[in-house]
Amino acid sequence: MKTLRLKGLDCPVCAKSLEDGLRATPGVSSVSVDFASLTMRIEAPGLESLKEAVGRIEPGVEISEASPVPKAQAAAQVRGLSALLAPEIRKEVLLILGAGLLAGLAFLVKASSVPSLAWLSPALLVLAWLVAGHDVLLGAGRNILKGRVFDELFLMGIATIGAIALGQYAEAVGVMVFYKIGEALQESAAARSRASVRGLLDLRPDMARVSRGDTWILVPAEEVEVGEVFRVLPGERIPLDGRVVSGESLVDSQALTGEPRPRRAFPGEEVLAAALSLDGSIEIEALRPAGESSAAKIASLVEDASHAKARTERFVTRFARIYTPIVVALALALALIPPLLGLGSLASWAYRALVLLVISCPCALVISIPLGYFGGIGGAAKRGILVKGGNVLDALAKTGTVVFDKTGTLTKGVFRVLSIEAPEGGSQDEVLRLAAQAEARSRHPIAASIRAAAMALGLSDGTDDGASEIREMPGRGLRCSIGGGTILLGNRALLEEEGIVGLPPRAEGAGPDQGGATEVHLARDGAWLGLLRIGDEAKEDAAPALAALEGLGVGRMAILTGDGLASAGPLAASLGIAEVHANLLPADKLRHLEAIIAETTALGATTVFVGDGINDAPVLARADVGMAMGGGADAAVDCADVILMTDEPSRVAEAVARARHTRRIVRQNIIGSLAIKGAFLVLGALGIAVMWEAVIADVGVALLATLNATRAMGNRP
């Protein structure tokens, strides 16, 4: 699957036509065209044959390999008026000015009242009409030849041709000129929105200062290999993901994570590509190639997201295809039926029909709605919330239930060993040593806390690799071989299932070290050796995050965790969550989540699951919206619909708020556009609105809807 840029694509209806045409082309197995981002994702051989097919289906549309917008160009477009200087828009402006000069000359000739020049004024106006609208007329003609008669080009063409036939030359020119002005302004607003998103995604520097031999040289970031060391000076952005090996600096990652507070990076800490080094020179070891950096992944996710269209986007494109023929039929009826009934002249009613055609153009809807979703995705990305499509935004907007994993999601995932218990005659040090050895290769936070405790007591150097035949059982524990003996390390349920001898009875009440702790039992060769109690604590913004969700009207929150109730219960109580399901295996999590989804769906709402572990992957995939913490396991991130670039639960509420903000903007555009157009359709049919007012209203509605759509890019929902 390759991503290609599109140039010369004028409208979403044309985008749909291109997509349908390519889908029917031999050799194309899948294709998605997105008008908002002007990109196409396609699986097909040969770029040249694709160019030929695109030119045949949509003449004037060009495709090219996807490449980042040059930084200077993106910055200029984001600043605003520079978007008007794009070559396509500059050409439109010149044509509009030319048509305006010809129209002005026509009015001067008419004002001269010279009888011999009476023919010149209409001729100049017709010429002005052709200058301003020749591409509209040619486009309408090409579409008719391809069997696509009813579109906005056809409406504008037939309306202005009709005005000329009725002798309304000035109005024909005015309609075409105002239409072209509106198109240029809409494209300018859309270009600024696209440039804002693409500029956001192209923050990673192109060059890296790498140590080669005895000197530092600048090389393309793509040429830096994993393990090489590169240097970043104060005020420069980091070109690749890496680990600081020398120096320290205050690092600003806001462009990636939305986190407004810079943090100080010391040797041993990881830093992300596109982060800004503020006050120090640091040397960094590359951990991933440039194409696999965090910034590159964000770019890929946001580009992909624009092709996952919301139901509203798909509906509006279909609506425009049905709506336009109906409007043409109504206009024809308005022009012919009243004169046949003796209610007025044909010319009078034909003029009203032309007004109806002008005001009925659906471009306000078909342009602003996909642009609104695109802006919503881009605005969320600016805050470190990666949403994989407009369909996900729609589902998020209807959130009624949020279900959380516990460890690493609501809690810090920074565990410590609170206490160790061994049977009479046993050794606590031996329990800790064996547990650390068994967990030597695990990435789980609990395993890290066990290794850290053993290292602190000198029982391990953190690199002991004596365990073999390791078999991990997600949500339960692990089995391995150490020194010829079989070690079992995990929760009570696992040891009970294995029939371990000497397992102590369940405690009736929790002691001072047991409340809120996770118990990890250890057994060797079928006999219980002891247990470790591991403690965790809630993240600082967990409680505010839940309060924010309540403020958004999310009526149900729950915790699904593999930890015991002794650990999950106190945490839930401290956060005000009444529904807790503990001691769950991955299959149990899935079963409980499906029950919650069924109950929430019955209320007309959606269910969001928030997690970060490998064992969360099935439930993240099953939820209406799966939301993964960015620092979580790759499997969780891959299965999720939304990725949070930080580990802050508060971003869950922000994601829901942003989705609802985008949805409100889309609804405002739909309702506002239809209401204003409906009012002018009635006024036009009654003969109150003239063609000038109709075209100004049409252009104005489209421009307002487009500008309103760009609000989705804002920093605050």
Image (cartoon, rainbow, N blue to C red):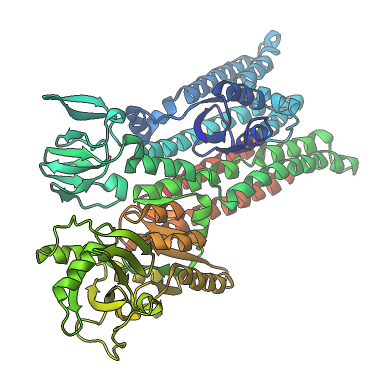
Q: Position of residue 632 (x, y in %)?
A: 34, 56
Res. 711 visible in picture: no
Pick the residue in front: 367 or 158.
367
Can residue 504 be seen?
A: yes
Quadrant in the rendering for residue 689: top right
Vertical order, 594 against 496 (above or below): above
Asked whether, in this view, residue 522 is left or right of residue 314, the answer is: left
Image point 62% across, 21% down: which residue?
52
Which quarter of the figure is the C terminus placed in?
bottom left
The front one of 704 and 353 is 704
Choose between 505 and 283: the one closer to the eye: 505
Q: Residue lying farthest bottom?
A: 508
604 and 673: which is toward the camera: 604
Residue 303 point in image, percent of width and height: 46, 40
Residue shown at the point (24%, 82%) measured from the top left: 514
Residue 71 image point, x, y percent: 33, 30
The reply, left or right, for residue 435 in relation to residue 593 is: left
Most extreme residue toward the top is 116
* Location of residue 265 in the rendering, given as x and y in whole percent from the top left corner: 16, 48
> Relative to 117, does residue 132 appear above or below in the rendering?
below
| Numbered-mark total | 0
- The answer to whether 355 appears left or right of 635 in the picture is right
Left or right position of 358 against 444: right
